[in-house]
Image: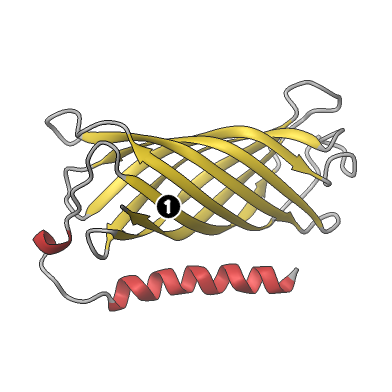
Amino acid sequence: MALLARTVTTFTTLTLITILIAPGVRADDVSPTITVGTQEVGLTAGYMFSHRLTELHTTKQHGPALMPSWMMTLTDPIGESWYRGQVSIGAEMVYLQFREPILTHGVGFTPRIKYTFVALGRLRPYAEFTGGPFWTDLGGNIDEQANEFNFVLTGGVGVSWFLTPQLAANAGYRFHHISNAGTAFPNLGLNASLPFGGFSFYF
């Protein structure tokens, strides 16, 4: 729906504006202290762009995405060099809207694991992976996927910029793969890029 697309665009714009108008404080003042047990609640929004990897992939699935999440830090910083970082795990819900060939929707729930690099203070790059069950009424309406129950796998990278010790703005990229793990045929899979932006609150 056009309203959802406008909402995602507005949310992403607000993320960028927040970074630009954040109060000018010394880096030491906002460098977070994240320890074992620290929790993170986040909201991320983005837009999918399809990848048709073979001649058999004909569907141009694209549309907005919303991804609320919760995570908990499992480790103190590991390592002593540029790769020094922390591991966190949690869960994420994902809502996707597909706009072609017909307007359809998808909802999933995925465990999530993230490794955050901490050597740069308030600027914290990270790598993440999610995977879990996914339902979409796009399945059965396209040549690539036969049924509505599927699985979604994502891998991505991003960066968090801490505006305060508890609040960070996030931006990054994910690669999305949707398939039914061979439970029905055809099962060519749907692949897409998902640039995203969002916020995280730590407590």
Q: Residue at x 42, y 52 (%)?
A: 41
- Front residue of this view, candidates 42 and 8: 42
Q: Residue at x 58, y 37 (%)?
A: 110
Position of residue 155 measured from the top left corner of the image (x, y, whole percent): 50, 37
Q: Is residue 11 above or below residue 36?
A: below
Position of residue 19 measured from the top left corner of the image (x, y, whole percent): 32, 70
Name the image quarter holding residue 146. top right
Asked if one can make out residue 103 in the rendered structure from this viewpoint, the answer is yes
Position of residue 75 measured from the top left corner of the image (x, y, whole percent): 26, 31
Asked if one can make out residue 55 in the rendered structure from this viewpoint, the answer is no
Position of residue 18 measured from the top left corner of the image (x, y, whole percent): 35, 73
Name the image quarter holding residue 21. bottom left
The residue lying furthest to the right in this view is: 141
For disc 1, the neighbor class at 10 Å (few under 14, some 14 to 19, many from 20) is some
- Front residue of this view, candidates 199 and 144: 199
Q: Residue at x 34, y 51 (%)?
A: 159
The colour scheme is secondary structure
Q: Is residue 19 above or below residue 176?
A: below
User: In the rendered view, does 167 fall on the left or right side of 100?
Assistant: left
| Residue at mark 1 | 41
Name the image quarter holding residue 104. bottom right
User: Circle 1 — which element?
Assistant: strand
Kind of residue sitting beneath label 1? Val
Image quarter hosting the N terminus = bottom right
- Front residue of this view, candidates 97 and 67: 67
Q: Residue at x 17, y 56 (%)?
A: 31
Q: Is residue 165 above or below residue 89?
A: below
- Front residue of this view, candidates 10 and 99: 10
Total tally of numbered discs in the picture: 1
